[in-house]
Image (tube, rainbow, N blue to C red):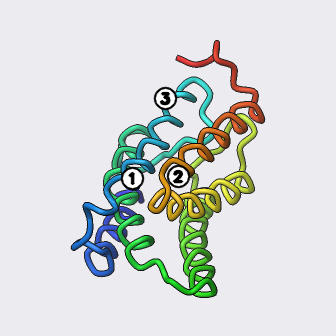
Amino acid sequence: MYILINILYLLAALKWGDWRNWKHYYPTILFLILGDFLYNFLLYKKSMWLFHDLILPNHTIITILAMIVSYSATVLIYLGRFPEEWSKRLLWFLLWVGIYLSVEYINSKFGFITYHNGWNMWWSVLFTVIIFVILPIHQKRPQVAWLLSIIIIISLLSIFDVKISEMK
């Protein structure tokens, strides 16, 4: 399943991604990837969600594939075609939140993602909204995005009662 998803993201990026300006988006791609690395590292012993697949052997491989392909494609398309008009920005934002949540919902129904330690689809909705709000902020004002991200990370660690002693 995840191989197919990443192939679709790659094809979409090849067609609609702003490849001419990839260096411009590279810091934001790394920002998104680092966020996922932090999740996987900080919550190694207390995962909120885990990916499963019929072909790929484990969560780590699935996550690395997503970081390399899906996240890069997302940033190249989402920010590469980010509209100037506020009304169009809202529609673009809703489209991308809808894409990500639709994929997650389908994956959850077929058991390709499982939720743990109090996480559920509603938390994913909130988290996905946050991601797509923060990406354009990071593109324009990285320091603000980092500050917001640190506040969000600390808040989520507190809400889900993740103790420093539970971390690897």
19 up-or-down from 68: above or below: below
Camera-side mark, 1 or 3: 3
Residue 24 rendering spot, x and y as whole percentages: 30, 63
Q: Which of 23 and 168 is in front in this view?
A: 23
Q: In this view, does 75 lie to the left or right of 97?
A: left
- Which residue is pictured at 70% across the width and 57% down the height? 126
SS label for mark 3? helix
Q: In this view, does 106 lie to the left or right of 41?
A: right
Q: Nearer the viewer, residue 125 or 132?
A: 132
Which residue bears the numbered disc 2? 112
The mark nearer the N terminus, 2 or 3, is: 3
- Which residue is pictured at 57% across the width and 23% down the height? 45
94 up-or-down from 31: above or below: below
Camera-side mark, 2 or 3: 3
Q: Residue furthest top?
A: 165
Residue 108 rendering spot, x and y as whole percentages: 61, 56
Which residue bears the numbered disc 3? 41
Which residue bears the numbered disc 1? 66
Q: Which of 92 and 87 is in front in this view?
A: 87
Dots 1, 3 in contact, CB < 8 A:
no
- Tell me the distance, in whole angstroms, between the alpha carbons under discs 2 and 3: 21 Å
Name the amino acid type tagged 1. Ala
Camera-side mark, 1 or 2: 1
Q: Which of 129 and 85 is in front in this view?
A: 85
- Tell me the distance, in whole angstroms, between the alpha carbons under discs 1 and 3: 16 Å
Residue 69 rendering spot, x and y as whole percentages: 32, 58
Instruction: Determine crowd level at label 2: few under 14, some 14-19, many 20+ residues with C-alpha closer than 10 A.
Output: some
Name the amino acid type tagged 3. Phe
Find residue 75 and report its image quarter: bottom left
SS label for mark 2? loop
Instruction: Determine crowd level at label 3: few under 14, some 14-19, many 20+ residues with C-alpha closer than 10 A.
Output: some
